[in-house]
Amino acid sequence: MRTLLNTLFVLSENAYLSLDGENVVVLKEDGSSSRFPLHTLESILCFSYKGASPALMGACAQRGICLSFYSPRGKFYCQTSGETHGNVLLRREQFRRADSPLCCRDLACSFLTGKIYNARWVLERTARDHALRVDVDGLKAVSRSLDTAVKSLSQQPDTDALRGIEGAAASQYFSVFDHLILQNKADFFFHGRSRRPPLDKMNALLSFVYTLLASDCAAALRGVGLDPYVGFLHTDRSGRASLALDLMEELRPVLGDRFALTLVNSRTIRPNQFEIQDSGAIFLNEAGRKATLAAWQEKKRDTLTHPFLREKIPWGLAPYLQALLLARHLRGDLDAYPPFLWK
């Protein structure tokens, strides 16, 4: 269990939540338990199979505590809330800001600051750790360009201009992405981003990993009461979780790209775990998807220090904490949304 931002995260998959007086009790499979006063909590995110007692759900509803249920892998199930739960006010504020070009520009600037900053440090980390195996000068040159792009974001007049900066930065970043692939170069190469459909194994792996990350971001947003379909950087489109795509931008390089590269460089993913269709499209086969999903769950258990909260957390909680910070900003508790800046 972790308590961050007045939110209780229950990560033990066999834990059961119950009510004792004014406390939520988390009972684990080995018989041990932990107690947390309800008055100190704004929300509870439960990633357990066993769930919670009706008494606790009722107490949370009465006190305005949002109790959200997920599978241990992070799939959003549902949440309980009372008649006066503030999520409707939060969503109305989200919709108001999504209709404001100025608010959209400011939030889009934060998302893209995180994305380009983190992309730069992916390159810097590779140049540092594998100096004898990569084109250090090429990586450093792109890193300097990305640094310039980050600094120029705050000077852009609107969201369209920000998208232009992001597009140019992404093109530069992916121009040297092939240098980050250190193993199986004959089978895993990268000559440019291809989507719908992916046309090589590395693009196929990236697309699948991005889908996993987007799903986790959408689940995180639902859990804090935001609508994942109403974004600020990505425009509204039927069936597209635009806010989830906004939120994942800053996590794309450090969680998505680095994870995919690790799978290839550690030989966890093999060339025979892909299938080539008659159209030329390439996708992970069933064995490849299973291997990627298993490694994804392990990756989410790895820990890091959150750059804004300065607390040690599992990687899997990063989307949830960013969603909480975004909700706090929209409610007026934070002057600005703090992007996830990894180094």
Image (tube, grey):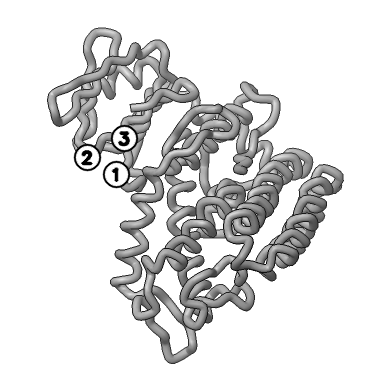
Residue receiving disc 2: 49
The reply, left or right, for residue 318 in relation to residue 83 is right
Which of 9 and 96 lies nearest the eye of the viewer? 9
User: Does dot 3 land on a helix, a strand or a loop?
Assistant: loop
User: Badge 3, how many Cα within 10 Å: few under 14, some, many 20+?
Assistant: some
Residue receiving disc 3: 11
User: Considering only order in the chain, which callout, 2 or 1, is on the residue closer to the N terminus?
Assistant: 2
Three-letter amino acid code of the residue under disc 1: Ser
Residue receiving disc 1: 71
Split into 4 quadrants, where in the image is the C terminus?
A: top right
Residue at (78, 60) in percent of width and height: 164
Relative image position of residue 121 (x, y in whole percent): 65, 50
Relative image position of residue 168 (x, y in whole percent): 76, 63
Which of 239 and 16 lies nearest the eye of the viewer? 16
User: Considering only order in the chain, which callout, 3 or 2, is on the residue closer to the N terminus?
Assistant: 3
Residue at (74, 40) in percent of width and height: 106
Split into 4 quadrants, where in the image is the N terminus?
A: top left
Which of 251 and 38 lies nearest the eye of the viewer? 251
| Snapshot quadrant of residue 181 | bottom right
User: Does dot 1 land on a helix, a strand or a loop?
Assistant: loop
Three-letter amino acid code of the residue under disc 2: Tyr
Q: Are marks 1 and 2 in contact (CB under 8 Å)?
A: yes
Mark in the foreground, 2 or 3? 3
The reply, left or right, for residue 286 in relation to residue 323 is left
Q: Are marks 2 and 3 in contact (CB under 8 Å)?
A: no
Q: Distance between the residues labelled 1 and 2?
A: 7 Å
User: Does dot 2 land on a helix, a strand or a loop?
Assistant: loop
